[in-house]
């Protein structure tokens, strides 16, 4: 069954809901990173409202979202320098114009792909990042520990990890602490399940 991602986004409209709280945590990690114009990628961006309100003028961003309704919502809020692509975020191709990025958002991705694809994606992130670039990611429940391990094993340093005791969502922020890899187009990262 294909999930209705537009309906999934409705929970953001309920103050205090897990999704609304998760977005505030994501924004909390983003704010200090967006202290000046940056190059930003959002994979599976949804309506983009985690990052779009925080982008400083002069930033460049590519948001990739498959659902045309959600992509249109993101476009409504997109300022100059922001490109919203209605496209498959699961290959490196849509990031050609923005890599290497200072910040990559992978929120709501790892819970919807296989562990093997999570491994592949995290191993490939250094090819999308500038030196010292940061990934902000989410994953529900205990599986987030495996994601932390994968970042650690691929040359990232943890800047922060939030695991509220009364909610299932987890949010991590990891900075690339080795040299980036060269960008390559056409590399398959993941397929949504
Ligand atoms: C769990 S939601 C996360 C949305 C947003 N990142 C957030 O955290 O609010 C997953 C999103 O991925 C989108 N999606 C699913 N498959 C995709 C693909 N292959 N390429 C791009 N977006 C995809 C869905 O339409 C949905 O908006």
Image (cartoon, rainbow, N blue to C red):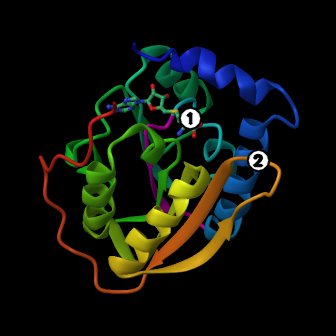
> Residue 167's mark?
2
Placement of the N terminus among the 4 image quadrants = top left
Tell me where residue 190 sits by quadrant. top left
Question: Is residue 98 found left or right of 143 in the rendered image?
Answer: left
The reply to whether the residue tagged 2 has its Cβ within 8 angstroms of ligand 1 is no
Q: Secondary structure at mark 1?
A: loop
Q: Tell us which disc is closer to us: 2 or 1.
A: 2
**Any mark on residue 78, and which?**
1
Residue depicted at x 59% and y 64%: 172
Magenta segment, which residues? Answer: 36-45
Percent across and percent down for residue 165 are 80, 57
Left or right position of 188 against 73? left
Q: Residue 34: x and y, percent?
A: 62, 64
> Is the residue 79 above or below the residue 97 in the image?
above
Image label count: 2
How far is the residue under mark 2 from the one under mark 1? 30 Å
Residue 58 visible at all = no
Q: Residues within 10 Å of mark 1 (few under 14, many from 20)?
A: many
């Amino acid at each position: 069954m294909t999930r209705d991602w537009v309906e999934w986004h409705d929970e953001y409209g309920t103050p205090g809901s897990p999704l609304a709280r998760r977005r505030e945590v994501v924004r909390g990690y983003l704010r200090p990173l967006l202290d000046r114009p940056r190059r930003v990628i959002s994979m599976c961006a949804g309506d983009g409202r985690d990052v779009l309100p925080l982008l400083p003028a002069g930033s460049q961003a590519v948001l990739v979202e498959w659902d045309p309704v959600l992509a249109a919502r993101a476009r409504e809020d997109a300022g100059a320098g922001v490109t919203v692509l209605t496209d498959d975020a699961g290959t490196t191709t849509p990031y050609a114009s923005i890599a290497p990025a200072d910040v990559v958002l992978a929120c709501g991705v790892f819970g919807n792909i296989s562990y093997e694809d999570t491994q592949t994606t995290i191993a490939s992130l250094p090819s999308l990042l500038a030196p010292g670039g940061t990934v902000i990611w989410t994953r529900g429940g205990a599986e987030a520990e495996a994601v932390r391990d994968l970042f650690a094993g691929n040359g990232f340093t943890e800047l922060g990890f939030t695991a509220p005791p009364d909610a299932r969502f987890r949010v991590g922020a990891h900075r690339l602490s080795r040299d980036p890899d060269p960008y390559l187009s056409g590399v398959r990262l993941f397929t949504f399940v």
